[in-house]
Image: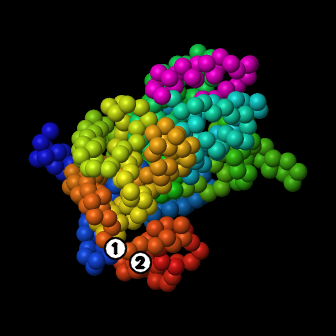
Amino acid sequence: MSATQTHAHADELERLLELVGGDLEVPLVGGEWVRYANLDMAASAPALRQVADIVAELLPYYGSVHRGAGFASVVSTEAYIRAREIARGFVGAREDDLVLFTRNTTDAFNLLASALPPGTTVLTFAGEHHANLLPWRRGDVRHLPIPASPADALDALDAALRGLGAGDALVAVTGASNVTGELWPIQEIAQVAHRHGARVALDAAQLAAHRPIDIAAWDVDYVAFSGHKVYAPYGAGVLAGPADWLDAAPPYLAGGGAVRNVTVDDVEWTTGAARHEAGTPAALGAVAIAAAVSALSATGWERIQAHEQELLERLLTGLDAIGGVRTYELWERGHDRVGVVSFNVADVDPALLAAALSAEHGIGVRDGSFCAHPLMEHFAARDGRPRQAVRASIGVGTSASDIDRLLRAVERIARDGASWSYVEHNGYVCPDPDPRPRPALGGLLSGPVAGGGSACRG
């Protein structure tokens, strides 16, 4: 496809799915200001403009959900209920599935882990995101080796399930790797699991913003995703799946809203979604998710996927042409993947590369091990790759010019090194000095930032 056609597709998608901050300009250490190239969509994507507008429209009516008779509470409650139904449709949940609002994918899987029947065995692959590794460790979890191919994954899962005795089992697997973007064979995994009587929990955190989800058609039992990955960064996520385990489990949080009746000495818990949503819910976050997934679906997944795949090919081709650059793939190049690419530049520390891309070029990427330490250790052992890498990720707001800026910057740094001086501070590599002005945020950032974290000035 020609550059002109690529730009035309990007312009059309930008019109349909405008991002808040899509025209953001950021300062460079040299004093210039440039448009921000956000290539960190896999971590947290900015809000869609229509999502922010809907949240702003709801704000004057914000009131207690399920608890108030006033008109604002009525509107907030109706919006919250409608958001749940939209989320249900987005993931293709079955009529009798529960759809719960959580904080994010990590929270959703911790909730599900707390609801597993006693004695449940969980099987997951060692290369999963920490959100799909750590919650299950409170019980019986089996870590399958990182597979050499999708077929190898199915064979390993089949063998492991055959070796289990009687009892409940859950297979927890990602839809798309947050390190390489590669898609896992979800339907085939569900077939293998169900053949042995096991259930399947799908981590759709990296899938939900890029491909349509249909757990009923795929015969997947549970699915979880985060609002901040689907252009709704307002602090909510979703867990959907069968009601039986969730209704039988103790409430995830003990508190108001999860009960039918409370006495001084006893409590009768409710069932359904409310059982695990005690306290005042994040109604704005739930509505934001509903607005975001509605906008994505209305735009059309074929259009979104075509745009992102064009840019992914542009990125991979460009990185391959730069001397000293190596990308990370779990399986052979060419396997279906979303727009996530991790890479390294020979003799350049990934943290320094990411810092220089930001400070000198106005490009946002992620560096590190991406909450997937065992997977990065696997790459180090198998390929001799560094355990740390840089990750560039693509979304609906990414343009060909963003990709080209990244490629030019990586090539320059690979050839000449960073132009500014940098030091390690609070565990991060930071420009030294860092003259870039911060926004005041109503005075929140007018003073020094204390206590570490990612701040490069404290």
Residue at x-position 55% and y-position 47%: 373
Q: Position of residue 400 (x, y in %)?
A: 21, 51
Q: Identify the magenta region.
A: 148-171
Residues tagged 2 and 1 counted as in contact (Cβ below 8 A): yes
Q: Position of residue 430 (x, y in %)?
A: 44, 71
Location of residue 368 with respect to 301 vertically, above or below: below
Can you name the residue that lies furthest to the bottom here? 447
Nearer to the camera, 168 or 131: 131
Does residue 117 show up?
no
Location of residue 257 with respect to 439 vertically, above or below: above
Nearer to the camera, 259 or 173: 173
Can you name the residue that lies furthest to the right here? 265
**Magenta stretch encompasses residue 139:** no
Quadrant (top left, top right, bottom left, bottom right) of the N terminus: top left
Please, what secondary structure does the residue beneath circle 2 have?
A: loop
Give the residue pinned by disc 1: 420
Give the residue pinned by disc 2: 432
Residue at x-position 32% and y-position 76%: 29
Residue at x-position 61% and y-position 18%: 159
- Mark 1 crowdedness (10 Å alpha carbons): few <14, some 14-19, many ≥20: some
Mark 2–mark 1 Cα distance, whole angstroms, equals 8 Å
Nearer to the camera, 69 or 400: 400
Q: Amino acid at mark 1?
A: Trp
**Magenta stretch encompasses residue 159:** yes
